[in-house]
Image (cartoon, rainbow, N blue to C red):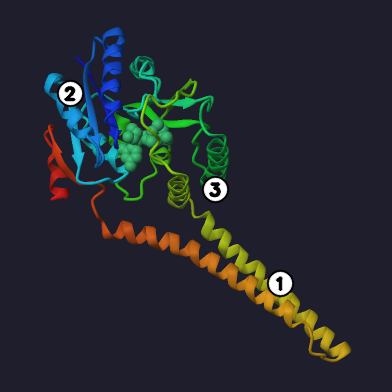
Amino acid sequence: MKKISIVVPCYNEEETVGIFLQEIQKVRTASLTEYDLEIIFVDDGSTDHTLLEIKRMAESDTSVKYIALSRNFGKESALYAGLTHADGDYVAVMDVDLQDPPGLLAEMVKRLEAGGCQCAAARRISRRGESVIRSFFSGCFYRLFRRLTGIQVPDGARDFRMMNRTFLDSFLKLKEYNRFSKGLFDWVGYSVDWLEYENQERESGSTKWTFWKLVVYSMDGIFAFSNMPAIISGGIGIVFCLLAFLFLLVIFGRALLFGDPVAGWPSTICIILLIGGIQMFCLGILGQYLARTYSEVKGRPIYLCRETNLILKKEVHDHES
Ligand code: UDP
Ligand code: MG
């Protein structure tokens, strides 16, 4: 019997984990009966009773597995922790709030079984129910991201997907600390089938993303997949050198022709401020790369496990201890 593992990151989701499991069980009896199922909840350092709830469910349902991280590491790390321990033939990634419709799982397995793709992923074709401002900035970000990085993340792409072993093993080879999974999923290549669906509102609880967190996450995405910001800042430097050289010629010419009356200090101050600003901006870009290089070089583990009912894989355990 082939096995499907579903990895579900959870952060303060005590109200949602139970409903999620019920929905998955419905789908299981309706359309996944020929598969063995394992649901790996990754408790990302929740401060509420999420872990307790999960443990309670694990007592009565042997397909419920959990990994509790030692603190909140963020969704990307939680995903990585779960994926590392998933040993199904097919492995799915889902949010716990039911914004990723479990009904699509059956279609995803079908596509993978057919063999035409190594990964079946989901894409929202509407953002109904989502804040207009968030949708707008999100749209702008993905357009900019595709332009700068050449990574093809389609509009509305979610982390919700199911992959076969080949795809997952390749994905797990990417052990970087600053993780932007949507980009990493595209980076590994293979063929991906996109399934489309209408946006679903959160079942209960609230989103864990503040606007600021999303801005930082977007920057992670761009800096992790593109050197373009550094190239652009170099370009700005060259343009300003050329402008300065032209200016020098103009000033020399003018002094030779008309003498050298002292004037124009306000414009000098403006230019100094402008160039100073641009320099700081470019240094900031350099700093972003340096900071990310620094965090990669330190080689800290992507997550730490506090508690689990899974048998931890050897190399991961060694890496953590
Ligand atoms: N999540 C997590 N760690 C975090 C933040 C979120 O594991 O630090 C989980 C959360 O419990 C949910 C999923 O990531 O299962 C997506 O989060 P959310 O629904 O808040 O994001 P949105 O759907 O609004 O993008
Ligand atoms: Mg959500």
Tell me the amino acid under the disc marked 3.
Leu
Disc 2 secondary structure class: helix
Note whether ligand 1 is within 8 Å of mark 3.
no
Residue indicated by mark 2: 57
Dot 2 amino acid type = Met
Disc 2 residue crowd, few under 14, some 14–19, many 20+, Cα 10 Å: some
Q: Report helix, strand or loop for mark 1.
A: helix
Residue under numbered circle 3? 148
Where is residue 75 shown, x and y percent of the image? 33, 40
Q: Mark 1 points at which residue?
A: 243
For marks 1 and 3 on the same chain, the one whose residue lies earlier in the sequence: 3
Residue at position x 79%, y 89% from top?
A: 262
Q: What is the secondary structure assignment of the residue under circle 3?
A: helix
Q: Nearer the viewer, residue 234 or 30?
A: 30
Apparent side of residue 194 relative to residue 297 in the rendered image (left or right): right
Q: Which of marks 1 and 2 is in front?
A: 2
Q: Left or right: where does residue 306 sit relative to residue 173?
A: left
Q: Distance between the residues labelled 1 and 3?
A: 26 Å
The residue under label 1 is which amino acid type?
Leu
